[in-house]
Amino acid sequence: MEASSELCRHESPSPRPSFTTLSCMHWTTDIRSHLVKTIIDD
């Protein structure tokens, strides 16, 4: 599971849907929402 987010950092998700791509999208969504919360809190 951890390898998925590691792959996400080093290369962009592949065009075709796959488990890794979905994990990558979910991972980036978590980061984005976290950043938004941080900005709003500031």
Image (spheres, rainbow, N blue to C red):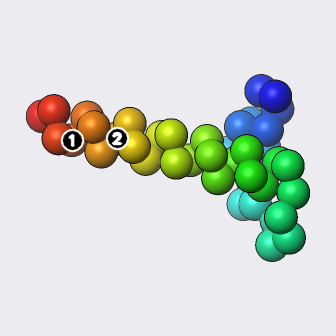
**Among all residues in the image, which is located at the extreme left?**
42
For image coordinates 75% across by 60% down, the residue present is 13
Q: Dividing the image into 4 quarters, which one contains the N terminus?
A: top right
- Residue 33's spot in the image, x, y percent? 39, 43
| Quarter assignment of residue 40 | top left
Q: Is residue 21 above or below residue 34?
A: below
Q: Name the residue rendered at 52%, 48% in the picture.
A: 29
The amino acid beneath tag 2 is Leu
Residue 8 in the figure: left or right of residue 18: left
**Residue that lies at the very extreme toward the bottom in this rendered image:** 15
Q: Are marks 1 and 2 in contact (CB under 8 Å)?
A: yes
User: Which of the labelled discs sits on residue 39, or is there none?
Assistant: 1
Identify the element where label 2 is drawn.
Answer: helix
Query: Foreground residue, 5 or 9?
Result: 5
Label 1 and label 2: CA atoms lie apart by 6 Å
Q: Which mark is residue 35?
A: 2
Can I make out residue 10 in this image? Answer: no
